[in-house]
Amino acid sequence: MLEKIDLSKKMEKKEFKEAIEEESLRLGKLQRECKELNIPVIIVFEGFGAAGKGTLINQLIQPLDPRGFNVYSINGESEEEKLRPFLWRFWTKTPENGRIAVFDRSWYRRVLVDRFDKVTTEDQLVSAYQEIVSFEKTLTDGGAVIIKFFLDITKKEQAKRFEHLLSSKETAWRVSKGDLKRNKHFEEYKVMNEEMLQKTDTDFAPWTIVEAMNREYASVKVLRTVADRLESQVAQVRSEKETQACLTAACEKCPAFRSSILSSVDLSLSYTKDEYKERLKALQERLSVLHSELYRRKIPVILGFEGWDAGGKGGAIKRLTQCMDPRGYAVNPTAAPNDIEKSHHYLWRFWQNMPKAGHIAIFDRTWYGRVMVERIEGFCTQEEWRRAYKEINDMEEHLYNAGALIIKFWMQIDKDEQERRFKERMVTPEKQWKITDEDWRNREKWDAYEEAVDEMMIRTSTTYAPWVIVEGNNKYYARIKVLETVVNAIEERLK
């Protein structure tokens, strides 16, 4: 790909000035339209060192309203970031709807600089490419525009620019030992860049190669490319708004998922109070020891709880955490998204709370709301919730590849037991806050939810993030099963 690029392209000053003025006006207008239409924009700058990324980013943002964008300069991982999955620091920087995020280097560091420096191993390379492409696909499917630039210069030109920067103490800091090493091994590093471009050039997030030998030519190409892409996206979104009718909450029946997983669960399983107390004490003591070992071994754990209203999620979580060091876990209750969360991709808010190495994150309701409540209540389109199965599987696989132990619990009770618990809550003063009119309304959609849960489990129970159905009519049995599952999974992982 790079061998075919004509790096001799230039632009005269007069032509440059006229073109920049024209494209700047377009960009200012398009930024306002993207804000109006809630289109998030991600612009990535990669390329060889000293190719002019900083200069071109500065040129790009000049016509933009500074209140509507952020620029992120990506260097090596901090100690905090090293404890997280590598995409965590990028997910947390994805822009909300209507805003622009500009990345001076990006997630591609994983397969470029880190690969060259042997931080990324060859074994990690395959999954890194897969995770990057999946990350970009998830964002663009969610409505984001991703514009990627690769700045290309020759080895000779790079060496010349490094020499110029090193000649002044004011600019010498901009040239690192790594930069000089990559210039020395330019052809080897170029092959890595070529491979990266080929493996990640997709129809939803294509690369634009910028001939960066001449700054004027490069500047105009960058601005014009951004303006063209945004103009196309704005036109597409406006067309969709005019021609597509809103989809209703009703989902098409899916015969392939009619076999009910939930209806076959044996809800008669139970423990007596004495059996419960004996098992609870032993399991909590064991979990306390394992929690310390997880921290020592730097293994992150993600526990997700879903289930029917009054299914026992809170009680199970309480028994789990009673024996844990509070400095090493966090319980994240998930409610309806607030305005800030709604303005981001639906997975964004969950990435904020993913655990660092050695810590446990417990989610009381999870990202699976997308394929349950949002599906049933019509809070997302059919296309969006159908697409979410793969997006969720990809996210969980990335977390697993980063070292996380992931277990997802479905707390299962029958409709009669739920009604009994609802009525008990209504007459018990200290429990009345747990019951709402919405809980009763949701019972009317029991069959629709059961169908959605069955499909969810079939599509998203994987070897790396399995679903565990907890027979919950007997609270004692449910709490012990959750604890036993967690203890057994941790012990197996520590082996």
Image: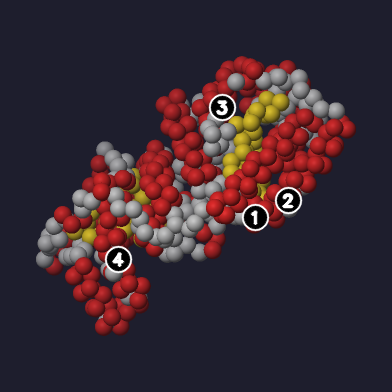
User: Which residue ends up furthest to the front in the rendered image?
Assistant: 243
Residue labelled with disc 2: 29
**Crowding near the residue tagged with mark 3, few <14, some 14–19, many ≥20 C-alpha atoms within 10 Å:** some
State whether residue 31 is above or below residue 131.
Answer: below
Spatial CA distance of label 1 from label 4 is 37 Å
Residue labelled with disc 1: 35
Mark positioned earlier in the residue sequence (3 or 4): 3
Mark positioned earlier in the residue sequence (1 or 2): 2
Question: Horizontal placement of 340 versus 368: left or right?
Answer: right
**Crowding near the residue tagged with mark 4, few <14, some 14–19, many ≥20 C-alpha atoms within 10 Å:** few
Residue type at tag 3: Leu
Mark positioned earlier in the residue sequence (2 or 3): 2
**Residue 186 shows up from this direction:** no
Residue labelled with disc 3: 197
Q: Quadrant of the N terminus?
A: top right
Residue type at tag 2: Lys
Residue nearest the viewer, comparing 180 with 73? 73
- The residue drawn where x is 58% and y is 38% is 106
- The residue drawn where x is 49% and y is 29% is 120
State whether residue 372 is above or below residue 178.
Answer: below
Residue labelled with disc 4: 445
Spatial CA distance of label 2 from label 3 is 31 Å
Spatial CA distance of label 1 from label 2 is 10 Å
Spatial CA distance of label 1 from label 3 is 30 Å
Q: Nearer the viewer, mark 1 or mark 4?
A: 4
- The residue drawn where x is 21% and y is 63% is 413
Residue type at tag 1: Lys
- Callout 2 secondary element: helix
**Crowding near the residue tagged with mark 2, few <14, some 14–19, many ≥20 C-alpha atoms within 10 Å:** some
